[in-house]
Amino acid sequence: MIKKESRNEMRKVRHARIRKQIIGTKDIPRLNVYRSNKNILVQLIDDQNGVTLASASVKGKNIEAATKVGADIAKAAKKLKVTKVVFDRSGYLYHGSIKALADAARENGLEF
C-alpha cells in the first residue's frame, strides 16, 4: 500500500524550499505567517540578528480573523517605521485566510 504524506509534512517541505530564498533584515523584515487549528499568528522577523521585531495573533482561523491580524501587524510595523516586508507564507497556499491577511496588510500600508 502506498503511504501518502500528510498535508502538514508537505507544507514543511514547501516552507523549507521557500526559506532558502527569503531573508529578512532590520529594514525589510520577513512577515511570517503560522496557522494552527484555532489561531493565526504573524511575526516580523529580522533573520540577520535572529530577532522578532513585532508579532500579532488572533483567536479564530476564518477570513475575518485573518483580516484583523493583517491590519494589526501593519500597525505594529508602522510604529517600527517599516513599510516594506518580505512575505513568508510558510508553505500555505496563497488562498483564503492567507490571501485575506496579505490584502489587509497591504491596505494598511505594508508593501510586498
Image (cartoon, rainbow, N blue to C red):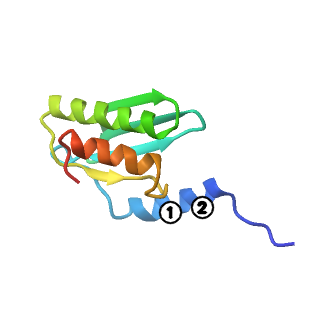
Residue drawn at x 39%, y 59% is 19
Q: Quadrant of residue 109?
A: top left
Residue 46 appears anywhere in the view: no
- How far across and down, in percent of the image, does residue 12 sit? 55, 56
Q: Nearer the viewer, residue 48 or 83?
A: 83
Judged from the image, the secondary structure of the residue bearing numbered disc 1 is helix
Q: Are marks 1 and 2 in contact (CB under 8 Å)?
A: yes
Judged from the image, the secondary structure of the residue bearing numbered disc 2 is helix
What is the count of numbered marks?
A: 2
In the image: residue 108, left or right of residue 15: left
Instruction: Please state which amino acid type lies under the numbered disc 1.
Output: Arg
Residue that numbered label 2 is attached to: 10
Residue 95 appears anywhere in the view: yes
Instruction: Please state which amino acid type lies under the numbered disc 2.
Output: Met
Q: Is residue 103 above or below residue 3?
A: above
Residue that numbered label 1 is attached to: 14
